[in-house]
Image (tube, rainbow, N blue to C red):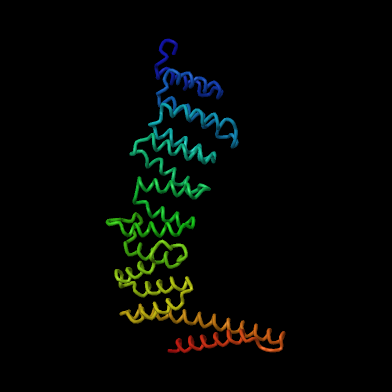
Amino acid sequence: ILRNAYSLKYWWRYMEAKKRSPARQRNLIAERALKYLPGCYKIWHAYLADRRAQCKAKEPGHPAHARLNAVYERALVYMHKMPRIWLDYLEILAAQHAHTTTRRAFDRALRALPVTQHERIWKLYLPYAKASPVPEAAVRIYKRYLQFDSDAVEEYIDYLMQIGRVSEAALKLAEVLNREGFVSLRGKSRHKLWMELCDLVTKHPDKVGSLRVEAILRSGLKAFTDEAGHLWCALADYFIRQALFEQARDVYEEGLASLLTVRDFSMVFDAYSQFEESLITALIERQAQQQAAADLAAAESGGASAEASKAAAATTLELDMRLERLER
């Protein structure tokens, strides 16, 4: 080594011979070698692996972890095109739960490595983003990933549903359906994706105000005639969840008048009957509550309240009308 300090062969033999030496001595030898050969991947890889092994038994927050991070930062000055160095460093940072430092390191890795190596980084980055305590950061990371691989949009939609961003999930699903030539990585057909969108917008009407839900469902009725019964029920359910009961009844009536198959007719008719029965049950409960309130007021004041009597009469009239409609 004294005769030829720039020979990798001699330095490597020296490091191999000192493998059983104390950690401080091994680190010193590796630092001396890197002083002469700073661009040698073989020495850096072995040195970093040794430093990781030294920190493995250390508790979180130990100064040895900060020193290990500093060594990695020095290595990346020369090894910034080596994905293995980046991957090891990112795993270490993720285990230390230093969220801002880790996120910035992921971004640096994506900037430093060629696009052909980005897939290896994203395999670590996406699970880290999903486990992040800040959903907004994860959403932004996913949006960047979709620029790299637009076919992974279904995974992004699932994550949006997981964190409760139903409106964004519905918009992204509608965008997928408008994209010509989209092929689902999960083997879902266009029909399956459309039905998922219909279920999503009807079950969360208060969160999808940016979409024209009725127009979406009616276009589905034209495109998928074999699912007409399901779609008519979904459209009525959309209005029911918004407490627009008369519009829901109109939808049921329109559906019954337009359906052509016994299966679809039976599905809509059963849903319509259940809807009317639930309204009648609610009216009966309301009538009982009003009657109890009127009796209490009469007992306290010695006579029935005019407003209570009027409200009870209106409820009775509406109940009679519903019962007559159900029998018809």
Q: Quadrant of the N terminus?
A: top left
Which residue: 58% across, 34% down?
A: 57
Count every numbered label the image shows and give the total.
0
**Foreground: 25 or 228?**
228
Direction front: furthest residue: 306
- Residue 14: give x, y in percent of width and height: 46, 18
Residue found at x 45% / y 27%: 75
Residue 105, given in percent of the width and then of the height, sits at: 46, 36
Point out the image quarter for the C terminus.
bottom left
Is 144 placed above or below 109 here? below
Residue 155 placement (x, y as % from top left): 40, 53
| Residue that protrudes farthest toward the top in the picture | 3
Quarter of the view holding residue 310 = bottom right
Measuring from the top left, give residue 79's x and y in whole percent. 41, 29
Instruction: Name the side, left or right, on which 306 lies relative to 146.
Output: right
User: Looking at the image, which residue is at 41% across and 53% down?
Assistant: 156
Q: Is residue 281 above or below residue 215?
A: below
Using the image as rendered, state which of residue 23 and residue 287 is in the foreground.
Answer: 287
Q: Quadrant of residue 212?
A: bottom left
What residue lies at 55% left-to-right and 34% top-to-bottom? Answer: 56
Position of 180 relative to 59 (above/below): below
* Residue lying at the far left of the rendered structure: 181
